[in-house]
Image (spheres, rainbow, N blue to C red):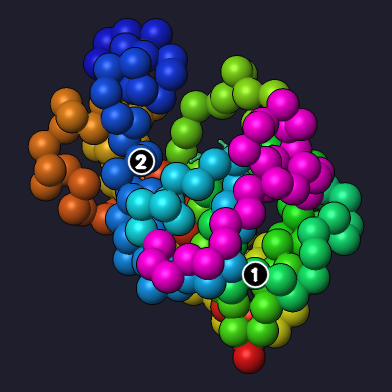
Amino acid sequence: MRRTRPYSARWGSDRGTGIDRVYLDRFFERHSKDMHGTVLEVQEPVFSARYGADIAETAILDIEPRNMLATIVADLNDLDVLPRESFDCIVAPQTIQYLTQPVTGLKNLYESLKPGGVLLITAPFIQKIDHNGEGADRLRFSPLAFNELLETSCDGAEIEVESFGNVLTSIAFLMGISAEEMRPQDFDVFDPAYPMLVTARVRRPS
Ligand SMILES: C[S@@+](CC[C@H](N)C(=O)[O-])C[C@H]1O[C@@H](n2cnc3c(N)ncnc32)[C@H](O)[C@@H]1O
């Protein structure tokens, strides 16, 4: 531990699976029943393809026009960039930290849900800054702040915020240790003082 440089500066992905990915999988697997019908996922169909069932159509959103998978190229910071009331489920992992206007971004996502549709969204709380991506990684969200932000942005929504992590998985993630280097039981303890990943299921009332 007495080192000022991490073992990996790439979230452990060059040593194996990033520790946050274990928690992301747990969250999306838990809500697999929500992923059906017309689905929108950010960047690429990772979690909807892994856990979705009865998906009729998958749209892909990205700000990056070079993303050949993107069917909607849009900046979530701009209001009304998404089609309204169009999706049964939106899968938005690890994207909100890049926004300059998170309230607008969440409004866009929420208002593009059909009535009864569900937004599954995650955000980092303890995580190194991404200097590699196209956008600037600028925000971190405590569970409390994430809940308040969702309440402000998503009018009338049913919101369930949860978080994952403990001091060991949080330190290991910062150090760039991979999930394969941990013991399975390390992931099972949740300590609300050390939330690594914050998640929300946001349902638009029918
Ligand atoms: C870290 S990736 C998240 C999805 C990834 N598949 C995952 O599992 O972590 C962040 C994505 O958000 C996109 N993004 C960043 N800023 C954005 C914005 N203002 N509007 C829309 N997409 C944005 C990036 O281009 C990138 O595709």
Quarter of the rendering occupied by the C terminus:
bottom right
- Residue, far bottom: 206
- Residue, far front: 56
* Residue 113: quadrant of the picture: bottom right
Question: At which x and y percent is residue 176?
Answer: 34, 21
Q: Main secondary structure of the magenta part?
A: loop
Q: Provide the secondary structure element on which disc 1 rests.
A: strand
- In this orientation, which residue lies closer to the viewer: 8 or 21? 21
Q: Is residue 89 above or below residue 173?
A: below
The answer to whether the residue labelled 2 contacts the one labelled 1, judged by CB atoms less than 8 Å apart, is no
Please report the residue visible at 57 percent of the width from the left and 62 percent of the height from the top: 57
Please report the residue visible at 80 percent of the width from the left and 59 percent of the height from the top: 82
Question: At which x and y percent is residue 45?
Answer: 50, 47
Answer with left or right where residue 80 lies relative to residue 153: right
Q: Is residue 31 above or below residue 121?
A: below
Question: At which x and y percent is residue 73?
Answer: 77, 42
In the image, the residue with mark 2 has its CB under 8 Å from the nearest atom of ligand 1: yes
Distance from the alpha carbon under mark 2 to that under mark 1: 25 Å
Residue 75 on the magenta segment: yes
Disc on the earlier residue, 2 or 1: 2
The span shown in magenta is 52-76
On the question of residue 139 being in view, the answer is no
Ligand 1 is found in the corner quadrant, namely top right
Residue 189 on the magenta segment: no
Q: Tell me the amino acid under the disc marked 1.
A: Phe
Mark carried by residue 87: 1
- In this orientation, which residue lies closer to the viewer: 46 or 29? 46
Query: Tag 1: Cα neighbours inside 10 Å, few (<14), some, or many (≥20)?
Result: many
